[in-house]
Image: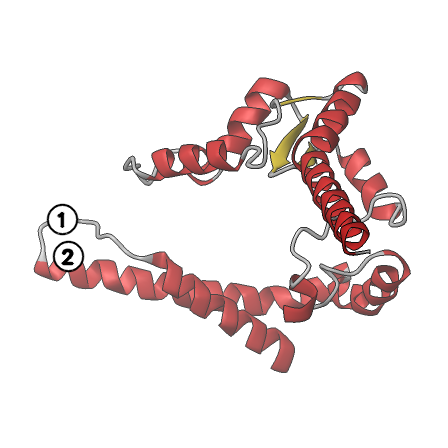
Amino acid sequence: MEISLASVTVSIAIALVSWWVWRTLNWVWFKPKMLESCLRRRGLSGTPYTPLVGDLKRNFTMLTEARSKPIKLTDDIQPRVVPYPLQMLKTHGRTYFTWFGPIPTITIMDPEQIKEVFNKIHDFQKTHTFPLGRLIASGLVSYDGDKWAKHRRIINPAFHLDKIKIMVPAFHQSCSEVVGEWDKLVSDHKGTSSSSSCEVDVWPWLVSMTADVISRTAFG
């Protein structure tokens, strides 16, 4: 009886380990390669799949390299902010696929295709890469299907063109105030330096301006 029980226990353990190994291999290799083959048969081009990491390492390396180089105010900012997508665009055109780990991501830039994706909410659902995201924050970004359509209808009137036009004076006032403060910084800098220009960290100004615009448009 003991031998029989031990054999059953070992068999169950082997079965569980085999099942876990198969699921891991399927997630890391077999399923991504099958999806890559399917995408290429449909005429899409993209990067070859790298096990587990996908394009994350390439994207991070290019981003780090781009941000390590100084740029001028007149330089094109795209190669610094989105170097990897820009390279993919030049290499594969306006429709291509990349890899977010073992998950393929298709990038489209045709307005008609984008419209089709937004309208067919049941056919093109969001990929929930981070399951804990719903627990941290839920909303229109994470909703799918009918729930997404319901909330979209609720907020849609707030972004009607006529209402956006009413908000333009608030946008203009907030922007003008920030530009005026920047002009004042340059004038003050001229008084203490021979240079006619100065370096400004615009990030805190943009954050403040965004909050200012929201408060003016939402609360008057």
- The location of residue 173, given as percent across then percent down, is 50, 68
Judged left or right of residue 3, residue 216 is left
Specify few, some or many for label 1: CA neighbours under 10 Å numbering under 14, 14-19, or 20 or more: few
Q: Nearer the viewer, residue 202 or 188?
A: 202
Q: Quadrant of residue 164?
A: bottom right
Residue type for callout 2: Lys
Task: Find numbered disc 1 in the image and state the secondary structure of the residue it sits on.
Answer: loop
* Quadrant showing the C terminus: bottom right
Residue type for callout 1: Ser
- Which residue corresponds to the image point at 59% horizontal and 31% vertical from the top-left? 51
Q: Residue furthest bottom?
A: 219
Specify few, some or many for label 2: CA neighbours under 10 Å numbering under 14, 14-19, or 20 or more: some
Q: CA distance from mark 1 to mark 2?
A: 6 Å
- The location of residue 118, given as percent across then percent down, is 82, 47
Q: Quadrant of residue 79?
A: top left
- The location of residue 19, given as percent across then percent down, is 75, 42
Q: Quadrant of residue 160?
A: bottom right
Q: Is residue 202 above or below residue 14?
A: below
Judged left or right of residue 217, residue 120 is right
- Which residue corresponds to the image point at 81% horizontal and 67% vertical from the top-left? 157
Q: Is residue 116 above or below residue 218?
A: above
Answer whether labels 1 and 2 touch (C-beta < 8 Å).
yes
- Which residue corresponds to the image point at 45% horizontal and 40% vertical from the top-left? 81
Please tell me which of labels 1 and 2 falls first in the chain: 2
Q: Which residue is mark 2?
A: 190
Whether residue 220 is visible here, answered yes or no, is no
Question: Which labelled disc corresponds to residue 195?
Answer: 1
Q: Is residue 37 above or below residue 161?
A: above
Q: Nearer the viewer, residue 95 or 46?
A: 46
